[in-house]
Image (cartoon, rainbow, N blue to C red):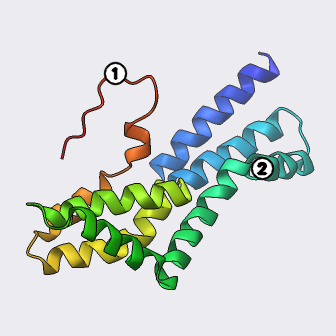
Amino acid sequence: MTVQTLAIIVLLVSFFVMIFLRFPIAYAVGLSSVLCMLVQGQALTDVCRLMVKGISSFSLMAVPFFITMGVLMGSGGISEKLIALADACVGWMRGGMAMVNIVASYFFGGISGSASADTASIGSIMIPMMVDQGYDADFSLKFKKRQFLPSLFREGRRDKVVSF
């Protein structure tokens, strides 16, 4: 039996044992991976170095910063001004508050480029406003949750239809 085969067996068996013992998934994956690397003969310092290297990517660091930026913009008042501009543009139409939600998200997406920051800043204001205007609370939450519009309108997609 080679070292790689033994490592795979240790990985799978330890993972399923931890799942059977009702460990959280993240702990089961992490501990079984560490056990697998130890069976392969790697030192614990290598394990720590690879774990830090795995989480120090720009993409993973950008998500909390985008959300923080959205919260700061929401508390700073920019979100209210974007909502007022969107309300002036489309608020008079039937279903105006839902359309204001979409247009404000477009404006905010142009500023931040992040759907999670948009939800953190615009969503915390628009959802209570929609409920106050008579929209159902479930509709308001689902409407905002499904508004990750930059992913819907990527270039090269042929079905550019938004369904609510």
Of residues 33 and 152, which is closer to you in this image? 152
Q: Which residue is mark 1?
A: 158
On screen, residue 109 above or below 132: above
Residue in the image at 11% along x and 69% along y:
135
- Quarter of the image where one finds residue 154: top left
- Residue 164's place in the image compared with 137, above or below, is above
Image quarter of the N terminus: top right
Foreground residue among 58 and 83: 83
Query: Local crowd at mark 1 within 10 Å, few (<14), some, or many (≥20)?
Result: few
Q: Is residue 19 left or right of residue 27?
A: left
Disc 2 versus disc 1: distance between alpha carbons? 40 Å
User: Which residue is rendered at x = 44% and y = 71% of the image?
Assistant: 121
Give the residue at mark 2: 51
Of the residues shown, which amino acid type is indicated by label 2? Met
Residue furthest top in the image: 1
Specify whether residue 22 is in view: no
- Of the two numbered discs 2 and 1 in the rendering, the one whose residue sits closer to the viewer: 1
- Residue displayed at 91% across by 44% down: 43
Q: Position of residue 110 (x, y in %)?
A: 50, 54
Please, what secondary structure does the residue beneath circle 2 have? helix
Asked if 2 appears above or below 78 in the picture, the reply is: above
Residue drawn where x is 24% and y is 78% of the image:
128
* Side (left or right) of 10 relative to 13: right
